Image (cartoon, rainbow, N blue to C red):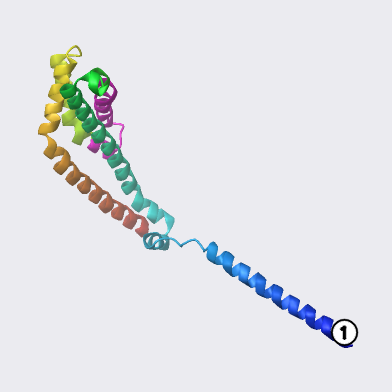
Amino acid sequence: LKRQRWQQQERTRQQQSALVQSSATSGTATRANPRPPGPSLPVQLLMIFPSPIVQAFLWPVHNCLLSLWMAIILVISLVSGAWRCLQTLIWGARRTGIALRTVWQSEIQDATQAIHSLCQPYQAISCRLVGLVLLPISTIVGIFRGILGDSSVTLTSMGFTMVMMATWWYWTICLPWLALCMLGAALASGTCFALIEFAGV
C-alpha cells in the first residue's frame, strides 16, 4: 500500500510539473508572437458606416489621389529632364554620359505627350484638371519644337531649361496650392456623395 501511494504521488508530481512546463511554454510563445494590432482609429470609424456610404465617400478621393500621383510623376520627369539638359549643356555629353537628344526624346517628349493625352475628353475630370495645369509647359515645348525643329536639339534644350528655371515659382508654389485645392474639393464632393447615399436619394 505504501508503495502504491508513493507511485500515485510521483505520478501526480509529474503531471503537475508537465502542466507547469506547458503553461510556461505557451506564455513564452504568446510573448514571442503577440497578437497583431487591430485596425487604426480612422478605419474603425469608417467601419461604423455601411460599405456603400464609405465607397461613395472614397470614390472622388481615390480619383484625386491617382491624378495627383500622375502629376507628381510628370513634374519629376520634366524637372529631371531639365536638370540633365543643364548638366549636359555645362559639362558636355562626354563627361556626363548623357546625350541631349536621348533626354529630349525619352523624358521631355514623353511627358508632354502624356500631358496632351490627359486633356482628352474621354479622361476623367481629375485627369483633365491635371493636364490643364501642366498644359503651359507642354505648349512651350511644342513652340520650341515648331520654331527650332528637331535638328537643333541644343537650342531647344537651352530654351526648355531656361523656361523651367524661370518658372520655378509655378512648380514650388502654385502646383502644391492647386493640389491642396483639388484634394479639398475631392473631400467635399465625397462628403456630399456619402450624404446622398446615406439619405437614400
> In terms of depth relative to the viewer, which is nearer, 77 or 40?
77
> In terms of depth relative to the viewer, which is nearer, 9 or 163?
9
Residue depicted at 82% across the width and 82% down the height: 8
Residue depicted at 87% across the width and 84% down the height: 3
Residue depicted at 63% across the width and 72% down the height: 23
Q: Amino acid at mark 1?
A: Arg
- Is residue 154 visible in this depiction of the protein? yes
- Furthest toward the right, the residue is 1
Q: Main secondary structure of the magenta part?
A: helix
Q: Which residue matches tag 1?
A: 3
Residue 11 is left or right of residue 182, and the answer is right
Residue 139 is left or right of residue 3, and the answer is left
Across and down, in percent, residue 37 comes to: 46, 62
The kind of secondary structure element at disc 1 is helix
Residue 146 is left or right of residue 31, and the answer is left
- Furthest toward the top, the residue is 151
**Residue 121 lies within the magenta run:** yes
Q: Quadrant of residue 103?
A: top left
- Is residue 100 visible in this depiction of the protein? no
Q: Quadrant of residue 167?
A: top left
Residue depicted at 19% across the width and 44% down the height: 176
- How busy is the neighbourhood of tag 1: few (under 14 within 10 Å), some, or many (20 plus)? few
Magenta part of the chain: 104-130
In the depicted structure, whether residue 76 falls above or below residue 96? below
Give the number of callouts. 1
Across and down, in percent, residue 14 comes to: 75, 76
Residue 59 is left or right of residue 161, and the answer is right
Q: Quadrant of residue 5?
A: bottom right
In the depicted structure, whether residue 107 falls above or below residue 167? above
In the depicted structure, whether residue 162 falls above or below residue 60? above
Locate the C terminus by quadrant: bottom left
Across and down, in percent, residue 147 comes to: 13, 15
